[in-house]
Amino acid sequence: MTSDGTHDARGTHATPVRGGSAEGARLTYVPPPPARAPGAAPGADGESFLAWLRTPRPGAAPGVWRFGHVPRPEQEPEVVPTRQLLTGAGIAFLVGWLIWSLLNNGYLGSWWIVPLELFTPDSWRSSESQVVNLLVWDGYTLLIVLAIMIGVGKIGRWDEVWRRFVAPRLRRPEPAEPQPAPEADPAEWPKLRAGGAGPAADRLAADARAGRMRDIDVARIARAWRSVRSGNSPLAAFTDAVVRDGAAACPHPSGDRDLPQRGARHDLATAQVRLGTTVDDPRNPYAYRGTGLALGPELIGTSLLAVGPAGSGKTGTVVWPLAEALCLQALAGRAAVVVVGAAGAGLGPGDAYDVVVRVGHPDSVYDLDLYGGTTDPDEAAAVLAEALVGDLVDPHPGADSRRSTTVLAQLLGPFHAVNGRFPSVPQLRALLDGVPGPLGELRKALQEAGQEAMLRELDARERQLGHPGDPGAVLADRIALLDRPAFAAFFDTSGQSTPFSLRALDHPVRVRIDLPERGHADASRILARLVLAQFTASAAVREDRSLFACLVLDDATGTVTPEAVRRIQRLRSANAGVVMTLRTLDDAPRPLRTPLLGAVGCRMALSGLTPWDGQDFADVWGKEWTEARDVTDRQIIAETPAGKAVHVLRRVITGRAPTARAVTVRQVERERWSASELAHAVPPGHAVLSLTDVRGEHAPPLLVDLRG
């Protein structure tokens, strides 16, 4: 069984195929087909599902794929090269043999018999009994031989030779692990039994053994059980539902129990998705080398920024696996996800989502709520101002768009007061342009309704019209980008369409928003900023924060504003996060690059990064103290025949010419990854990734193979 639950071909019988070459009949072995496709959910049969469920998942450092993980030591053990180890062991044996031969033949005298003469009676040593002589003399001889072998074995590292070359070949196949006790077997649902839901546990255990349960069922029912334990759901209702429906109990509102297909490897028991493998490279900590690299809500909750040029694999190896994992978590009732990208960007099939908003496409079933579902004019004005002119604000961390927010509030408040809704895009454009007709009609309606406070707001707006520095003109120009024929059927506020609002983040919803980048690039950036602003505003005011909320921006170009950076920093405490990608940090204003890298907890630099982008990552990752070793080798010249013979022997043993080595060790402070290394030393398909989880634990920058 491999780490993702599939059967390993090495543990099954291969099919022999006889080759037909002229050199002779040679047998080649074709491995059998796997039990299921990579990334498929465990649950094709009861045995594979139970094996997945019982696989240990020990605690590990942030980012380690925990499914079947075997922890490694923190420090790398010293490994002697094979040639040097075997040569040294052989020479040690010959030295021991030589010493014993010299002792046994009397070339070194008889001093080694003195201990026997001192500690044994004379009658034993001069006895005529063959048994006594065998025990005394041969026993003492064996003792001396063992002492010599132990000494030379210690010098020749025979114990390491045994561990590396002999013991693995003598090791018997490990017996199958015994079935765990019922109180420790996760397939028996011990937590449900301990909590008083014994009948439900019996039904779930039967479904698991029969192969009617999948990994997502385990995650979904575990989520429902936590709701019972927290007092939000009654125990009787939970037990009745599970006894009646079994593994299909507590379903997602869509009724789906899985995605149409999976492209990545997931472990829903730990809510992790595997992105790749940490490279066995000296720059990576030893405990991480060769382990799987995985992300989960505890890491994405600090937000993720991935930077890499086009073609570096941002969408295929980072964005879509994370979006797929969040969609699975939504089906398990654990998360709400909104995925934003260009149409046709490869963000999964429409069947993988509950809501698909295709802005600008006439066949789109759902519309996008321009005001985020709020009825507060000030809140709607703040979000809309961020979307329209957030990128025009002075790009410094302390800047904001309060003047634009005020202008919009002066129009949205009066309009909502008399109409009970906010204006549509054409109506808002006409009000911002100061067209006399719409403003006059609005004033007349306010007077008839007796809205004196709103009349003062409208009067203030009319006084500012045409003044130098009035933000209304810029807002009108920006809203005009959305007042195009392609968007005529969208952003409707009259109730005739089906708008999607990000107020739905209180529910485990899966949403994909396709932006019309082709021909409407500026409008797409406005909409991306709008969704980001609405998401950060809605995530912060959710009543149920037990759901993890995540926004995935496939291309965050034009969305990095001072207000966006401030709001992203506040998402961690709201159990929410943002996944963003950029082709280059040049897509963000220069004053905001460092605050942006500081606001996110997970930072990824993909291959192909430019040196100036690499410098920003190098600065934020900082430096570390390392041990620098300066080695100086000076070749030794032998002048005598004996010396030359010794040098030849040393060359045979070590494979190098005899040298006198001087080693200087000192502590120096160096960059973890320099700008040059990030630009030129990251292979294609790889990335350097640093991680921070919501508890504050962090992992240093890791070189990761995203293809493994």
Image (cartoon, rainbow, N blue to C red):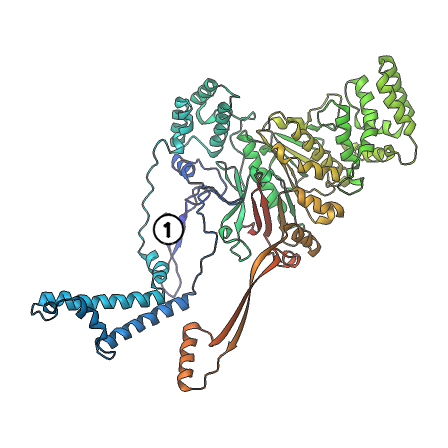
Q: Position of residue 652 (x, y in %)?
A: 41, 75
Q: Is residue 519 visible?
A: no
Q: Position of residue 207 (x, y in %)?
A: 40, 28
Single out the residue that lies furthest toward the front. Answer: 118
Q: Position of residue 26 (x, y in %)?
A: 37, 60
Query: How busy is the neighbourhood of tag 1: few (under 14 within 10 Å), some, or many (20 plus)?
Result: few
Displayed quadrant of residue 57: top left
Say if 379 sits above or below 136 in the image.
Answer: above
Q: Residue at x 39, y 59 (%)?
A: 19
Compared across the picture, whether 657 is left or right of 489 comes to left
Q: Residue at x 11, y 67 (%)?
A: 124
Q: Is residue 306 visible?
A: yes
Q: Nearer the viewer, residue 705 or 245?
A: 705
Q: What kind of residue is marked 1?
A: Thr
Q: Nearer the viewer, residue 502 or 123?
A: 123
Q: Position of residue 255 (x, y in %)?
A: 53, 26
Displayed quadrant of residue 374: top right
Say if 106 sits above or below 579 in the image.
Answer: below
